Image (spheres, rainbow, N blue to C red):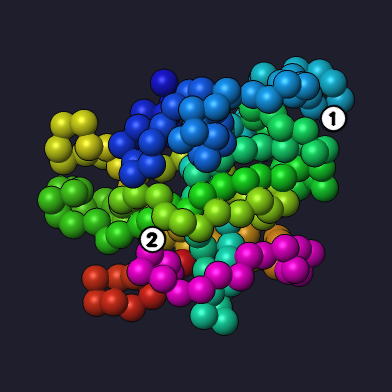
Amino acid sequence: MNKSRAIAQHFHYARSVSSTNRLRRIAQESRFRPGHDLNYTPSGDSCSNELSLSILQPITTLVFCDQRLFLCIAEVNSLFLDGKSVEDIPVSILPEKISQVSYQGLCLIPATFADIPDGKYDWRSSSLFTLSAKVPGALIQPVNPGIASHIPGNLFFVFETSVLMAIAVNLRDHVVCSHHRAILLIKVSDCFPYQELDGAYSHC
């Protein structure tokens, strides 16, 4: 079982393998709608040997908030290739115009000593929040965070500031100019931008 699926059931929203779309999962609707080509790729061939982005996988993206650019951690709701819903997308195809990713934002809070005794990580996930969007795949970068728990069954993702900053710089350098208009504009909320313990916005 991959990390995203191991932790998914511990988030705030109800989960169900019956659907890969969060709203349809809550409504207990079927996972795939009639007519979906689950094996669709631009070439028509299987890409099982390639690194792929999948449903429920954590990702990073950029958003504009409070007139600034911020890194946002999110979870994949749905994936689309050439307008068709698919179960996964090869990472190599994400920059192509035919790729789109639907996601929901993930709250991050500063990690404490109780969360991470060795102090290696300084951020941890807490829950999903209301931010959701469908954006070009070029605005998405997959991430493979660690998983930790201080209470049996209470799992969460863990992140290092230095790694998040490097991802933010990479995304900024590669997508801001060519996809500036596609970057989501959101309002300040209790969940975003991510805040340090002293209330200051994270630099990520």
Distance CA(mark 2)–CA(mark 1): 36 Å
> Given the image, on which type of amino acid does mark 1 rest?
Pro
Pointer 2 local density, CA inside 10 Å: few below 14, some 14–19, many at least 20: some
Classify residue 12 by image quadrant.
top left
Q: Which residues are magenta?
A: 177-193
Q: Is residue 182 highlighted in magenta?
A: yes
Q: Is residue 53 highlighted in magenta?
A: no
In which quadrant is the N terminus drawn?
Answer: top left
The spot of residue 143 in percent (x, y) is: 51, 44
Q: What label does residue 42 carry, if any?
A: 1
Image position of 105 (left or right of 112): right
Q: Secondary structure at mark 2?
A: helix
Hey, which residue is sitting farthest bottom in the picture?
67
- CB contact under 8 Å: marks 2 and 1: no
Say whether residue 68 is visible. Answer: yes
> Given the image, on which type of amino acid does mark 2 rest?
Thr
Q: Residue at x 44, y 27 (%)?
A: 16
Say whether residue 163 is visible. Answer: no
Which residue carries the number 2 mark? 161
Classify residue 81 by image quadrant.
top right
